[in-house]
Image (cartoon, rainbow, N blue to C red):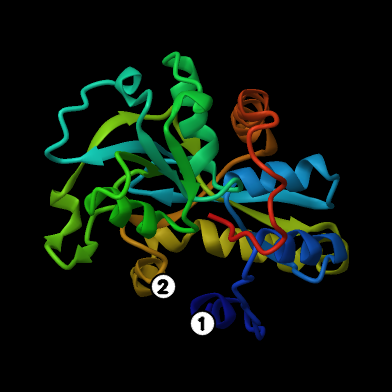
């Protein structure tokens, strides 16, 4: 945020909200001028008619999309999604794009219904899912691409203890959205902010800021609302597949 504050000549107050409900509530009140969120959360906000517009998306390793993974233990003989019937599968959260929705759709398209799994749990984070599969508490888990990379457990590098069984369809990267109130009150600042963020990938001075946002983060790219239609479609398909299977999402559910 220091890079943006210096580039714009304004003070920036940044915060990390603890849950899905807190993020949606803040967006409903338009108490946030700019929001970065997961693709599914953006679709949920769009469904609710909240007054936020997509401005940019994150760029990871030059791509405007990423994948989800269904992982299994490295020494597990499971070779196909179909073989997960009767197995224990860990998910992140009902609000997680790759940690649930896209994975559930991937399973369904392979002919595996969630009701056919021996056990399913929401563990609250991608790291916890990786650790649960690495420790063989679960036979498989749903996470974002390369979630295990760099994670260390009691037995060493967890990236060496799990392997990818299947990738999901591509998922558009996390959107950066501005509120209607912000666009109306400071339109010139919005234009400058978007231009500054788009130029970060070419500015050596911005590399430290980008690196702090995660491995492979190399800038921001233009996108639009239509790019997230695939997420909306996947969410509808997932909801159809899980209707009546899980209770309502708790209000303090983390945004995964």
Residue visible at 32% across and 44% down? 138
Asked which secondary structure carries label 2, the reply is helix
Please say if the residues under marks 2 and 1 sit with CB atoms less than 8 Å apart. Answer: yes
Residue 180 x %, y %: 84, 57
Image position of 210 with respect to 43: above or below: below
User: What residue is disc 2 on?
Assistant: 209
User: Front-most of 16 and 75?
Assistant: 75
Please name whichever residue, 33 or 10, is drawn nearer the observer in this view of the structure: 33
Tell me if mark 1 has few (under 14), some (14-19) or many (20+) residues whose alpha carbon lies within 10 angstroms of its own.
few
- Residue drawn at x 45%, y 13% as measured from the top left: 111
In percent of the image, x 11 and y 38: which residue is there?
Answer: 75
Q: Give how far across and how far down residue 246 sits, in percent.
A: 64, 39
Q: Is residue 248 above or below residue 209?
A: above
Instruction: Kindly identify the residue that appears in the image at 41 percent across and 73 percent down.
Output: 209
Identify the disc placed on residue 2.
Answer: 1
- Vertical arrangement, residue 164 with respect to residue 29, above or below: above
Residue 216 in the image: above or below residue 235: below
Q: Earlier in the sequence, mark 2 or mark 1?
A: 1
Give the quadrant of residue 20.
bottom right
């Amino acid at each position: 945020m220091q890079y943006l504050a210096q580039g714009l000549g304004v003070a920036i107050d940044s915060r990390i909200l603890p849950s899905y409900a807190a993020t949606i509530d803040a967006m409903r009140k338009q108490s946030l001028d700019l929001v970065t969120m997961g693709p599914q959360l953006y679709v949920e906000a769009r469904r609710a008619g909240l007054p936020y517009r997509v401005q940019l998306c994150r760029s990871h390793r030059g791509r405007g999309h990423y994948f989800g993974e269904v992982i299994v233990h490295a020494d597990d003989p499971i070779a196909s999604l179909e073989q997960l019937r009767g197995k224990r599968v860990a998910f992140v959260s009902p609000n997680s794009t790759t940690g649930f929705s896209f994975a559930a759709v991937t399973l369904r398209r392979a002919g595996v219904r969630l009701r056919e799994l021996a056990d399913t749990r929401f563990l609250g984070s991608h790291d916890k899912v990786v650790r649960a599969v690495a420790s063989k508490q679960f036979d498989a888990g749903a996470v974002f691409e390369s979630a295990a990379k760099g994670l260390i457990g009691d037995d060493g590098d967890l990236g060496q203890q799990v392997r990818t069984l299947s990738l999901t369809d591509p998922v558009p990267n996390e959107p950066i959205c501005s509120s209607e109130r912000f666009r109306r009150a400071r339109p010139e600042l919005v234009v400058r902010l978007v231009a500054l963020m788009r130029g970060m990938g070419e500015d050596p001075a911005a590399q430290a800021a980008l690196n702090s946002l995660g491995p492979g983060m190399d800038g921001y790219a233009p996108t639009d609302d239509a790019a997230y239609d695939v997420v909306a479609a996947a969410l509808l398909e997932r909801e159809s597949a899980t209707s009546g299977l899980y209770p309502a999402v708790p209000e303090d559910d983390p945004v995964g």
